[in-house]
Image (spheres, grey):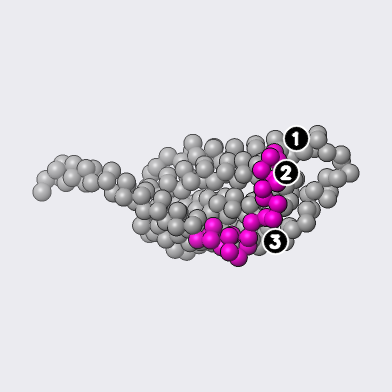
Amino acid sequence: MKTDALIDLLAADLEPSRLRFRERLRLELACGGFVAALILLFAVHLRADLGAQIASLRFWFKFAATLALALPAAGLVFRVATPGAETKLWLRALFLAPLVLAFGVFAEAIATPASSWPAQLVGHYAPYCLMLIPLLSAAPLTCLLHALRRGAPDDAGLAGAAAGLLAGGVGATLYAFHCTDDSPFFVAAWYSLAIAIVTLIGYAAGRRCLRW
């Protein structure tokens, strides 16, 4: 086979291969999220006053913050799995989550007296937050790393960290249905720390299992 013909053949096969890989990545993410949701429902449980909190802006703020992280992280995961893919746009999009958190903290600081800030920051269940978000992130992270092994990331550590960031966002989103600490101060401090732990785990796991 001539070189030009071989190149044309490989190029023709590249896009279908990418599509198949993306479908697999979506499927594995969905499976991991489903397992995490089952853990939430049957082991962790939803908060008892969930129905009463539907009208609370502070309740919905938690989801705005976690999804502002999870959605760009998902875009980043799909990009880092492909060699040479451009990631700058999605890396910049990750700054959306800190901006959402900063806005929530600022609004809470204006709406509440300063004397209540320490109590809101500490909350009631910080240790549970640091334990349960990684627990709910475990299945999504495992599935994402398994799927990424079928890809070819240039930077194994970055790919693992991106997977950890996405899994942490998914875990935090699910945990928000259980958590009764709704203050943006609490979310900014403890949710962020828990997600950072999952991201570090993802980074370490990626460096170990995603190398070519």
Q: Farthest right residue?
A: 115
109, 30: nearer the viewer: 30
What residue sits 42% from the left and 39% below the top? 86
Q: Position of residue 164 (x, y in %)?
A: 53, 55
Mark 3 or mark 1: whose residue is earlier in sequence: 1
Which numbered disc flags the more N-terminal residue, 2 or 1?
1
Mark 1 residue type = Ala
Label at residue 107: 1
* Residue 206 in view, yes or no: no
Residue lying at 63% horizontally and 60% vertically, measured from the top left: 45
Q: Amino acid at mark 2?
A: Pro
Q: Which residue is mark 3?
A: 128
| Residue situated furthest front in the rendering | 51
Q: What's the residue type where badge 3 is placed?
A: Tyr
Q: Is residue 176 left or right of residue 159?
A: right
Task: State how far apart marks 3 and 1 are (Cα).
Answer: 25 Å
- Closest to the observer, 27 or 103: 27
Q: Which residues are magenta?
A: 35-57
> Is the residue marked by circle 1 packed among few (<14), some (14-19), or many (20+) residues within 10 Å?
few
Q: Which residue is mark 2?
A: 184
- Name the N-terminal-most of marks 3 and 2: 3
The crowding category of the residue bearing disc 3, from other C-alpha atoms within 10 Å (few below 14, some 14 to 19, many at least 20), is few
